[in-house]
Amino acid sequence: MNDLNALVMAAQSAFEGCHTQADLENAKAQFLGKTGRITELMKGLATLPTEEKKLQGAAINQAKQAVEMSLTQRRQALADEELSSQLKAQALDVGLPGRLRPTGGLHPVSLTLERIEQIFDSMGFEVAQGPEIETDWYNFTALNTPEDHPARSMHDTFYVEGGYLLRTHTSPMQIRHAVSHVKRHQALLDAGQVMPEIRVIAPGRTYRVDSDATHSPMFHQCEGLWIGENISFKDLKVVFTDFCRTFFESSDLVLRFRPSFFPFTEPSAEIDIQFPSGPLAGRWLEVAGSGQVHPQVIRNMGLDPEHYMGFAFGMGPDRLTMLRYGVNDLRLFFDGDIRFLSQFR
Ligand code: DAH
């Protein structure tokens, strides 16, 4: 009996000493295999007398069951260990902070352009786009600025092969848009009828040989044009005042139309604004050129200046952005420094 207990304990400690399933199968063979120690004991029963056989047989069977049980337990323990070390190896640490993906935002000047478009849209203006590489005709001549005109010297620009130039202002869009508008309604005009009014703004990039804190060789302008049968300077004042007060969210904003000269308008005015309060209060700040469209320009649009008249203006969205956000150096807009740009998100 004691021998059997010792045998069971030997089997248990052999199984405990195994750390892989393969080792455990080898250890099992030593006790339960064909020539294993338990099996050998069973074989030895054959030579015993019947009574003895019964007693010994039952004891050996018990020992065998005990060995089998500890084998099963060890198998399970090894499987558990394997699983938990696998889980540890594949661990997902949900405690790690997430990776930040910063969201982009519109450039401050783009925000201003969107705002300008929204406000003029609410006043019934279309938005037109035109080429940045222009012909001399659209940029100067059609705008009543012939080749020897001194006004050209203020518009030094970059000339491109083939007689093209980088447009110095968005004013060429007055002609381009008006000409295509007139073409579309030529049948009405030929029949002596009145064509629908031209009411458009044209924002975009413009170029001049200029560079300092308030001038950049590439800058933005937004042109405005309203042509009809009886559109006058009075309408310009109403529209532009309304625009400025909406844009700057200040109903007390004051405007001044200061006499000036542009070849394509007569009379012409520069438009200044004055804030009623805030850091810029009391100063006159120039925001646009404007005027009543010159009869020669009306003619170049394909219209009769005896029947059609209107106003035009050209403003600087870069400058409007500087005023709105209190930025004092224009170059910041075009440096592309994310620390500056992210403040407008
Ligand atoms: N194109 C002019 C410039 O860049 C600005 C301007 C003045 C535009 C008068 C206009 C206007 O439409 O009527 O200096």
Image: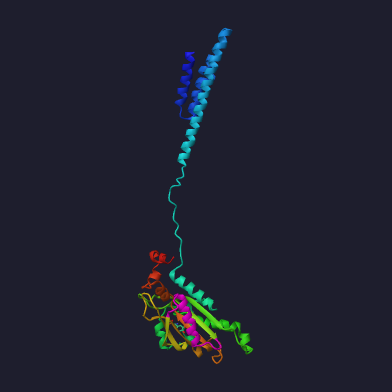
Q: Nearer the viewer, residue 277 or 129?
A: 277
Q: Which residue is at a point 51% across and 82% down the rendered structure image?
A: 225
Name the outermost residue toward the top: 49
Question: Does the magenta portion include 286?
Answer: no
Q: In which quarter of the image is ligand 1?
A: bottom left
Judge whether 178 appears above or below 101 on screen.
below
State the image coordinates of residue 12 (x, y, percent, origin top left). 47, 22
Name the outermost residue toward the bottom: 306
| Tag count | 0
State the image coordinates of residue 323 (x, y, percent, origin top left). 40, 75
Judge whether 28 appears above or below 226 on screen.
above
Q: What stretch is highlighted in magenta?
A: 228-253
Question: Does the magenta portion include 248?
Answer: yes
Quarter containing the C terminus: bottom left
Regarding residue 333, the answer to whether it shows in the image is yes
Q: Which of 301 and 230 is in front in this view?
A: 230
**The quarter of the displayed image where residue 160 is located:** bottom left
Left or right relative to 124: residue 156: left
Judge whether 129 appears above or below 56 on screen.
below
State the image coordinates of residue 199 (x, y, percent, origin top left). 54, 81
Regarding residue 136, the answer to whether it shows in the image is no
Q: Which of 12 and 140 is in front in this view?
A: 12
State the image coordinates of residue 180 (x, y, percent, origin top left). 57, 81
